[in-house]
Amino acid sequence: MSDITIELNNVAKRYWLRRGWYVTSIRDEMERLTARLLRRQVAPREEFWALRDITFSLKRGDVLGLVGPNGAGKSTLLKILSRVTVPTYGSFVVNGRLGALIEIGAGFHPDFSGRENVYLNASLLGLSRKETDRVLPEIIAFAELGDFFDAAVKTYSSGMYTRLAFSVAAFVDPDVLLIDEILAVGDEYFQRKCYAKLNEFRSRGKTICFVSHDLAAVERLCRRGLLLEHGTVRAEGVFTTA
């Protein structure tokens, strides 16, 4: 069995820009085609490459820090790995159960309670009802949401979303964990809990991709670093202190 958990080969992602918007949805394309059929003038489109020719691999136990300025392509890369979007060209594989925290509220139904969303997310990750029942007390204890655990998540603050999302991702026992700056939303106490859990994951040989602008946190947690700029890899290296 291969020890590779994540592998990307020449992955690139292109978006089309029109009137300041990314043309990424069927609705956008339908509006453009309708305008053409009605012979209305359509603003010219420009291509924007969020990623170009990204190639790297991670083995079991690797912890990678993705750094770079806003718009460098970090979030796009995690969205490809979590299959939220697809690459324009290139290929990638993710082996094992995937846990992802890439956007506040992503994967949660706003009208469901925290408890109901736990079961929903766990089922999407392949857990049975019995397996979810087993880890539910740990999720409740870690999230510390009190009575809000049974309230609709549309009533949650961003910090409460973070507590629920991290708790679900942590206790469904993923083989690969993707985190995109979401921990910056939580309070300091919960951040410390999360970093302690991530260090536990690292000691258990989990693979982690961690996006953050906090370079000290990246260096403390990660063994490797990848610097993205304008969608390309500008530098990569190993942290000797992690």
Image (tube, helix red, strand yellow):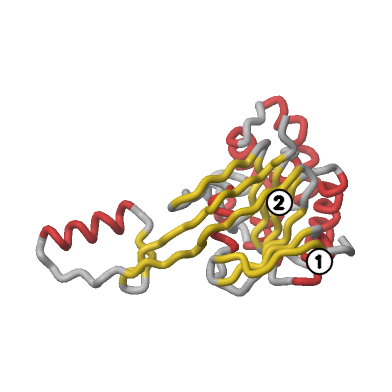
Q: Residue at x 78, y 38 (%)?
A: 137
Viewer-proximal residue, 159 or 152? 159
The kind of residue tagged 1 is: Glu
Position of the C terminus, as image quadrant, is bottom right
Q: Residue at x 59, y 41 (%)?
A: 93
Q: Which residue is mark 1?
A: 219
Mark 1 surroundings within 10 Å by alpha-carbon count, few (fewer than 14), some (14 through 19), many (20 or more): some
Residue 111, can we see it? Answer: no
Foreground disc of the pair 1, 2: 1
Numbered-mark total: 2
Q: Which residue is mark 2?
A: 166
Residue 141 location in percent, x, y?
80, 46
Residue 113, can we see it? Answer: yes
Labels 1 and 2 touching (C-beta < 8 A): no
Establish if 209 lies above or below 126: below
Disc 1 is placed on an element classified as: helix
Q: Earlier in the sequence, mark 1 or mark 2?
A: 2
Quarter of the image for residue 240 reads: bottom right
Residue 11 left/right relative to 66 = left
Quarter of the image for residue 235 reads: bottom right
Q: Residue at x 67, y 49 (%)?
A: 57
The kind of residue tagged 2 is: Phe
Which dot marks residue 42? Answer: none
Mark 2 surroundings within 10 Å by alpha-carbon count, few (fewer than 14), some (14 through 19), many (20 or more): many
Q: Residue at x 74, y 44 (%)?
A: 59
Viewer-proximal residue, 242 or 35? 242
Residue 52 left/right relative to 192 = left
Give the distance between the C-alpha atoms of the residues marked 1 and 2, in whole angstroms: 21 Å
